Image (tube, rainbow, N blue to C red):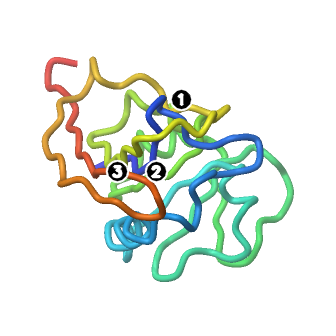
Amino acid sequence: MIRFIAALDKNMGLADDHGIPWLGRLPIDEKYFRDKTIGGTLLMGYGEYSMKRRPLVDRRNLVATTKTETLKDGFEKVSDARKFLITTNEDIWVSGGANLFTSTLDLADELYLTRIDYDFNCTKFFPKYRDRFTLRLKSQLYNEGGLTFCFEVWSRKFNQ
């Protein structure tokens, strides 16, 4: 099963040129991410990897990159994310960034999205998905760090 997990602002923004603007303001969302991905395999793009000092604990940390440099300890290189996702038998959590989401959206089975009701003027966006997926679950609204948000789970439409 291939699952995407991401937080999006009201315009489907993921990040700006400096990173994730709401980082540290939504502990409930951080716990949600941790609870969903703990014990699993996480695939991230190079941009997300470069913001991390160390691998996420109790997860296999894969980095989609064609760069030849050696990765930090605890991270494993995946040279071709698309091929990896097509051929793996593992359950995978794809955590971004924007290019990785866009290039592999057609392979996703489920989307775990945190929808934040605020415009952060992001420069990196999650791809359009509503025509390929059906909303399966939507949580209550949460208010934290001056922001309102909810959790959504989307499943791939079978006729796609």
* Residue at the limit of the structure toward the front, as seen here: 146
Q: Position of residue 55 (x, y in %)?
A: 62, 75
Rendered position, 91 above or below 158: below
Picture residue at 56% right of the left edge, 31% below the top = 125
Instruction: Specify which label sits upstream in the sequence, 3 or 1.
Output: 1
Question: Three-letter amino acid code at disc 1?
Answer: Ser
Residue under label 3 = 149
Say few, some or many: other residues with alpha carbon within 10 Å of mark 2 (under 14 / 14 to 19 / 20 or more).
many
At mark 3, the secondary structure is strand
Residue 17 is situated, as x and y percent measured from the top left of the image, at 76, 41
The image quadrant of residue 32 is bottom left
Q: Disc 2 designates what residue? A: 94
Depicted 56 relative to depicted 82: above or below: below
Q: Which mark is residue 50?
A: none
For the C terminus, the image quarter is top left
In three-dimensional space, the C-alpha distance between marks 3 and 1, rounded to whole angstroms, equals 26 Å
The relative height of residue 5 versus residue 108 in the rendered view (above or below) is: below
